[in-house]
């Protein structure tokens, strides 16, 4: 058999292998802050015209280059309210099961369709009130004492799905004009607790440290990273810089490069 024939066979076999590469399905649960990172620098006209996002472009390029089959999609979650720890606890722990809760999918539902589940919290979640000394897992009050109970219950719940990988963002913060110093300090304390105590190495939960990207060691989202000095949504420049970092982290988790 000549060299040309061998080369054609090799190309055919490689093509068949990439075509039948098992699909890894990934869902990103978010609202407006997550949407900013999802689209990155893509302007709103291009979004509407071809539904393009920086995250999707990153994944498409990676798949072509590495012959992988990662498919990522997004979902507004919960569909009709912000996503604070209380909301995830209510849907995934308190009302778990094979039926949606108020139209939102439980982990039993999501884990059947997706290999990786990513979720985040809205930046008003950083407006943390002072503790009362009487923590209540059923309370929607934004307090460290309540958050810690809710996060702990969520971790236990996610551990019930060992074949599913979970990626959780550390807290999003506000610009200085929209939160007090005490609230900012409590958010910093929450971030430290999540990173140093809540997180467990070697399990199926991975923390993406969005808080550190937003604050860069400070307490607030700098005005130049935000839409404005009074709007705590990430600006387009910041989103464009962080979007590929987020995408790479997700792929590294999917590929098993992060433990």
Image: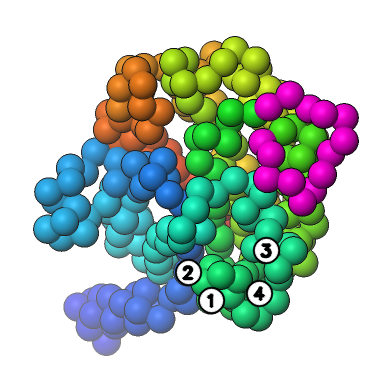
Asked whether disc 1 touches disc 2, contact meaning CB atoms under 8 Å apart, the reply is yes
Compare marks 1 and 2 and give the one earlier in the sequence: 2
| Quadrant where the image shows the N terminus | bottom left
Q: Considering the numbered disc 2 on the image, is that residue within a helix, a strand or a loop?
A: strand
Front disc: 4 or 2: 4
Compare marks 3 and 4 and give the one earlier in the sequence: 3
Front disc: 2 or 3: 3
Badge 2: how crowded within 10 Å, few (<14), some, or many (20+)?
some
Badge 4: how crowded within 10 Å, few (<14), some, or many (20+)?
some
Badge 3: how crowded within 10 Å, few (<14), some, or many (20+)?
many
Q: Nearer the viewer, residue 47 or 180?
A: 180
Compare marks 4 and 1 and give the one earlier in the sequence: 4
State the image quarter where residue 144 is shown.
Answer: top right
Q: Which residue is mark 1?
A: 113
Front disc: 4 or 1: 4
Asked whether disc 4 touches disc 2, contact meaning CB atoms under 8 Å apart, the reply is no
Q: Which residue is mark 3?
A: 92
Compare marks 1 and 3 and give the one earlier in the sequence: 3
Q: Considering the numbered disc 4 on the image, is that residue within a helix, a strand or a loop?
A: helix
Q: Which residue is mark 4?
A: 108
Task: Examine the residues drawn in magenta and state their main secondary structure.
Answer: loop
Region in magenta: 129-142
State the image quarter where residue 154 is shown.
Answer: bottom right
Across and down, in percent, residue 9 comes to 29, 82
Q: Which residue is mark 2?
A: 25
Compare marks 2 and 3 and give the one earlier in the sequence: 2
């Amino acid at each position: 058999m000549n060299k040309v024939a061998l080369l054609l066979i090799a190309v055919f076999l490689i093509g068949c292998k990439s075509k039948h590469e098992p699909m890894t399905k990934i869902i990103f649960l978010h609202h407006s802050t997550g949407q900013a990172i999802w689209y990155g620098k893509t302007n709103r006209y291009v979004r509407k015209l071809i539904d393009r996002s920086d995250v999707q472009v990153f994944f498409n390029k990676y798949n072509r280059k590495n012959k992988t089959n990662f498919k990522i999609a997004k979902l507004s979650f919960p569909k009709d309210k912000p996503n604070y720890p209380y909301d995830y606890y209510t849907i995934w722990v308190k009302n778990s099961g094979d039926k949606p809760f108020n139209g939102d999918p439980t982990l039993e539902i999501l884990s059947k369709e997706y290999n990786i589940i990513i979720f985040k919290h809205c930046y008003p979640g950083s407006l943390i009130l002072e503790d009362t000394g009487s923590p209540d897992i059923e309370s929607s009050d934004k307090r460290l004492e309540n958050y810690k109970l809710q996060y702990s219950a969520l971790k236990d719940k996610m551990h019930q799905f060992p074949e599913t990988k979970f990626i959780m963002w550390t807290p999003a913060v506000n610009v200085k004009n929209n939160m007090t110093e005490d609230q900012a300090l409590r958010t910093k304390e929450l971030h430290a607790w999540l990173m140093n105590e809540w997180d467990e190495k070697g399990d199926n939960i991975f923390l993406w440290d969005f808080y550190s990207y937003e604050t860069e060691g400070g307490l607030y989202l700098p005005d130049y990273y935000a839409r404005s000095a009074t709007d705590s949504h990430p600006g387009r420049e910041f989103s464009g810089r962080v979007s590929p970092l987020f995408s790479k982290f997700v792929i590294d988790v999917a590929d098993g490069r992060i433990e």
